[in-house]
């Protein structure tokens, strides 16, 4: 597990999987809320100077999060997260994909499966994210788009949000 807020990212191309582990010095309940409430997600999800803007959020099995990554010039790149399985306070699984403003999947990108786990550890929370892909090419496409750097920046934003104790 990650300790001292270290980020661990492992890429397993043959198994088409990326695993990210990050420790946060905050209670699991706080970290869970930051990942499952749109007003909080909008504050940290996008790498600066971009921002996330939720169009619709229905956090339940069968629900979804439809949002845009909005650039400094107001360019919007849409994504959707379909929630598959939720274990309140401990984990959720979802299907993530790029889409248009109406939520229609982009034909240029494939979907990826996300499993997010939240575990109490060392007085804080370890977040373990496993992303799996249908093909190696799908995984490589996401990595080539700068996923690792962008997601790392987003997690750093989350750490700042949690340090500001905005989540009570």
Image (tube, rainbow, N blue to C red):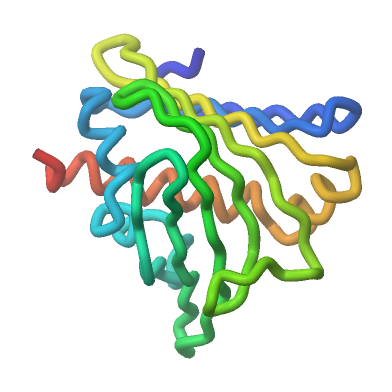
Q: Quadrant of residue 120?
A: top left
Residue 57 in the image: above or below residue 139: below
Question: In the image shown, does 167 or 160 lie closer to the viewer?
Answer: 167
Which quadrant is home to the C terminus? top left
What is the x, y in percent for residue 68? 48, 71
Residue 6: tell me if it is visible: no
Residue 47 in the image: above or below residue 111: below
User: For this view, does 41 lie left or right of residue 154?
Assistant: left
Q: Please report the residue visible at 45 percent of the width from the left and 66 percent of the height from the top.
A: 67
What is the x, y in percent for residue 75? 53, 85
Residue 7 in the image: above or below residue 108: above
Q: Please report the residue visible at 86 percent of the width from the left and 32 percent of the height from the top.
A: 13
Q: Quadrant of residue 18?
A: top right
Farthest residue, direction left: 168
User: For this view, does 167 lie left or right of residue 143?
Assistant: left
Question: In the image shown, does 38 or 84 lie closer to the viewer?
Answer: 84
Farthest residue, direction bottom: 73
Q: Please report the residue visible at 55 percent of the width from the left and 49 percent of the height from the top.
A: 151
What is the x, y in percent for residue 73? 48, 89
Question: In the image shown, does 58 or 156 lie closer to the viewer?
Answer: 58
Residue 18 in the image: above or below residue 53: above
Farthest residue, direction top: 122
Q: Please report the residue visible at 75 percent of the width from the left and 31 percent of the height from the top.
A: 17
Residue 30: tell me if it is visible: yes
What is the x, y in percent for residue 27? 21, 24
User: For this view, does 69 lie left or right of residue 51?
Assistant: right
Number of labels in the image equals 0
């Amino acid at each position: 597990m990650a300790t001292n807020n270290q980020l661990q990212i492992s890429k397993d191309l043959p198994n088409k999987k990326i695993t990210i582990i990050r420790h946060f010095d905050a209670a699991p309940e706080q970290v869970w809320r930051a990942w499952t409430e749109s007003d909080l997600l909008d504050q940290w999800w996008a790498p600066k100077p971009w921002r996330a803007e939720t169009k619709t959020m229905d956090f339940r099995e069968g629900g979804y999060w439809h949002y845009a990554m909005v650039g400094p010039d107001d360019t919007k790149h849409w994504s959707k997260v379909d929630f598959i399985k939720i274990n309140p306070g401990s984990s959720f699984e979802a299907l993530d994909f790029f889409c248009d403003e109406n939520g229609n999947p982009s034909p240029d990108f494939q979907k990826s499966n996300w499993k997010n786990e939240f575990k109490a550890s060392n007085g804080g929370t370890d977040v373990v994210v496993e992303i799996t892909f249908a093909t190696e090419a799908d995984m490589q496409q996401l990595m080539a788009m700068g996923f690792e750097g962008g997601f790392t920046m987003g997690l750093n934003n989350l750490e700042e949000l949690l340090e500001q104790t905005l989540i009570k």
